[in-house]
Image: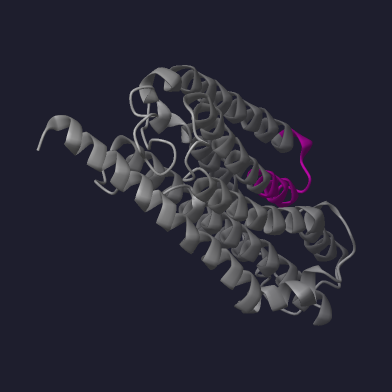
Amino acid sequence: MSTQAAAFIKLFTGSIIALRACLPGLTWVLHDYCKSDFEFSAIRYVWPHRWNFGKILYMWIRYYGIILLIFDVTQIHLFTRPGITSDTVCVVMDSIIRVVGAILLWSIEIVMQLRIYALYDLSWKVAAINFFLFMVSIAGFTWILVHNALRRHAVIAAAIHLPLPGCPSIHTGIEWAQWVPATAFEGVLVCWALYKTVSTSLIRWHNGFKVSLYSLILRDNLFYFLGIACLLVFNNLMVVGITKIPWFSYSPFHAAMEIITSRMIINLYKAANDAVSKNFVSLPKYRFLFYSYTSYC
């Protein structure tokens, strides 16, 4: 088999894998929405809650995530039709796919910043530091995106006219670093949570009950960070080919981020609601903490 034939088979196989792997991501998120007990918890604990920034963010992440998965599946299957793809269209769509995915990730990082903000008693100094680093991570993402986009046209030029089902699955330049700024910022957020938890003893209630708010926030923060960080790292490893696993589109990654964050927010609302209903937050300080978390995620 010639080298050109082997290269074509590799590109064709990569396109087919991405085409088929995007559907499980959409199925996963729709199943979680329609069949999961967490959605019933959202109806019970989140929907009746007064409208605030936390509730708006939950609705945005939940439904934007579903729309994003539908977009992933639609565009990748639409591009399999002959005559739709071109080198310009593929270059533009490659950047669009990353941007719409980054919007979901940035929305999730806003949720985490607000949780840290509430955890530090609404400290504007902490919020300012996190916001600055957040903007730096966005700037880093944008620079890498533009850097790769300017070079992608030349990289896919030889493969764009091949009879492939969609755009060529070719990773270029420093694409492996696309999500490194976001991963680094995730590390900063989890360090804030760890520092606060270690430096602050568990709050004791007037009746001897130990409040689980800090442990809940720490657990969810760690679970979120490890889950999202592992997804980002695995994504980067797939791009550089270390895992030897073929690229299977962003759809599973988008589904996992949407589900993890939605459940994290629902858990918080449920914990706050249970604490209020059991009169565990009768003291002003504890009531302030719980209301801060449910107002600012």
Q: Is residue 277 left or right of residue 155?
A: right
Question: Is residue 255 depicted above or below 186 in this figure?
Answer: below
- Where is residue 270 drawn, in percent x and y? 72, 73
Nearer to us in this view, 82 or 194: 82
Q: Position of residue 129 (x, y in %)?
A: 67, 31
Q: Is residue 212 visible?
A: yes
Q: Vertically, is 114 above or below 174?
A: below
- Write the residue at 78% across / 77% down: 44
- Residue closest to the eye, 157 or 149: 157
Viewer-proximal residue among 149 and 208: 149
Position above or below: 69 against 98: below
Quarter of the rendering containing residue 211: bottom right
- Residue 263 in the image: state x and y as whole percent: 62, 65
**Residue 247, visible in the rendered structure:** no
Residue at 50% in and 36% down: 83
Q: Looking at this rendering, what residue extends furthest in the right direction?
A: 50
Q: Main secondary structure of the magenta part?
A: helix
Q: Nearer the viewer, residue 272 or 226?
A: 226
On screen, residue 3 versus residue 85, left or right, reads left
Counting from the top left corner in percent of width and height, residue 112 is at: 65, 48
Seen in the image, is 138 located left or right of residue 174?
Answer: right
Indicate yes or no whether the magenta region holds residue 98. no
Q: Which residues are magenta?
A: 109-125
Quarter of the image with the N terminus is top left
**Residue shown at 22%/35% (left/top)?**
7
